[in-house]
């Protein structure tokens, strides 16, 4: 499970990571409302599952830690872009 809190102290929807190859909506049956899911054969988070997809309606800034999947090039590039976009506002 990936859990996060925004700067206002609100819980961001939980993301469950399942050890599977294909995701099926049924595996989230009974999860907390708003929960999202992803799959990875190992059951661990990876870059694709960790990176957030911000939008105009749901802005986000990614602040990665020192986890192995947080220090890969796509995560670093996304973090830099989000910080650059923020400073231009």
Image: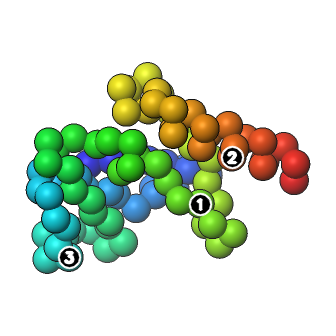
Left or right of residue 53: residue 4: left
Rate crowding at label 3 as few (under 14), some (14 to 19) or many (20 or more) other CA atoms within 10 Å. few
Outermost residue on the top side: it is 66
Circle 3: element type: helix
8 vs 1, nearest the viewer: 1
Q: Name the residue located 78 percent from the left edge and 48 percent from the top edge.
A: 86
Residue 82 at what x, y percent from top left?
A: 68, 46
**Dot label at residue 54:** 1
Query: What residue does disc 3 label?
Result: 25
Query: What residue does disc 2 label?
Result: 82
Asked whether disc 1 touches disc 2, contact meaning CB atoms under 8 Å apart, the reply is: yes
Q: Name the residue located 69 percent from the left edge and 69 percent from the top edge.
A: 56
For marks 3 and 2, the one nearer the N-term is 3
**Colouring rule applied to residues:** rainbow
Rate crowding at label 2 as few (under 14), some (14 to 19) or many (20 or more) other CA atoms within 10 Å. some
Q: Is residue 29 visible?
A: no
Asked whether disc 1 touches disc 3, contact meaning CB atoms under 8 Å apart, the reply is: no
Rate crowding at label 1 as few (under 14), some (14 to 19) or many (20 or more) other CA atoms within 10 Å. few
Left or right of residue 47: residue 43: left
Residue 66 at what x, y percent from top left?
A: 43, 22
Query: Could you tell me how far apart the alpha carbons at marks 1 and 2 are, in whole angstroms?
Result: 9 Å
Q: Is residue 12 above or below residue 68?
A: below
Q: Name the residue located 27 percent from the left edge and 63 percent from the top edge.
A: 37
Toward which corner of the image does residue 87 lie, by quadrant? top right
């Amino acid at each position: 499970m990936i859990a996060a809190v925004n700067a206002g102290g609100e819980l961001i929807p939980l993301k469950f990571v399942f050890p599977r190859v294909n995701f099926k909506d049924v595996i989230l049956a009974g999860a907390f409302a708003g929960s999202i899911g992803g799959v990875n054969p190992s059951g661990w988070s990876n870059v694709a599952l960790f990176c957030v997809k911000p939008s105009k309606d749901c802005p986000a800034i990614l602040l990665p830690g020192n986890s192995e999947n947080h220090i890969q090039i796509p995560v670093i590039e996304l973090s830099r872009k989000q910080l650059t976009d923020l400073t231009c506002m």
